[in-house]
Image: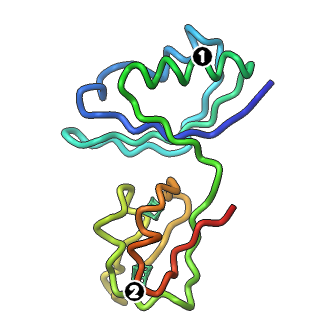
Amino acid sequence: MAETKVVFHYPTRLLETPVVSRLVRDFNLEFNILRADVTPGAEGIVVLGLAGETKDIERALAWVKKQGVAVQPLEKDVVRIDDRCTECGACITLCPTAALWREVDTQAVRFDPDKCIACEICVPACPPRAMRVAF
Ligand code: SF4
Ligand code: SF4
């Protein structure tokens, strides 16, 4: 049995469509929702762990893409080198999952790896290169 982790980026028009349940019914896959960020009127992001036969995973992902969902493999992590962060805040509004935010009390910029989907948007945007891709 093969396993993989993927990020589904749902356009607004597909938010009501039961895409994930079809993975079980039509492609014999097991899934585990690792993270989900679905806001009405905005793009939805769901991070999934998938398990099944390799050919079924490939067929399923091809079907998902055909429905209009952008599929991003989650093969790497984005990390922050805390010593380099200058708390400038440039990354906060760019992060699609609110994995980076400013703490009200201390004004420090925090990073939550559990919310990060490794989209890498913050990596080039960080002036002192505190955000890094870790393979
Ligand atoms: S890579 Fe950066 S911008 Fe993307 S989800 Fe993670 S922290 Fe947010
Ligand atoms: S852009 Fe970089 S330096 Fe600025 S707050 Fe974010 S991680 Fe820290």
- Residue that label 1 marks: 59
Residue at 56% from the left image edge and 91% from the top image edge:
83
Which is more N-terminal, label 2 or label 1?
Answer: 1
Q: Residue 49: x and y, percent? A: 62, 36
- Residue that label 2 marks: 108
Residue at 45% from the left image edge and 39% from the top image edge:
46
Residue at 42% from the left image edge and 91% from the top image edge:
86
Question: Which type of secondary structure does the marked residue at label 2 adopt?
Answer: loop
Q: Quadrant of the C terminus?
A: bottom right
Q: Residue 59: x and y, percent? A: 59, 16
Mark 2 Cα-neighbour bin, 10 Å: few <14, some 14–19, many ≥20: some
Q: Amino acid at mark 1?
A: Arg
Instruction: Identify which residue, 128 or 48, lies in the foreground.
Output: 128
Residue 74 vertical position relative to residue 132 in the rendered view, above or below: above
Judged left or right of residue 80, residue 29 is right
Residue 114 vertical position relative to residue 51 in the rendered view, above or below: below
Res 36 quadrant in image: top left
Q: Residue 24: x and y, percent? A: 58, 15
The alpha-carbon separation of the residues under discs 1 and 2 comes to: 44 Å
Give the image's coloring scheme.
rainbow
Residue 107 vertical position relative to residue 100 in the rendered view, above or below: below
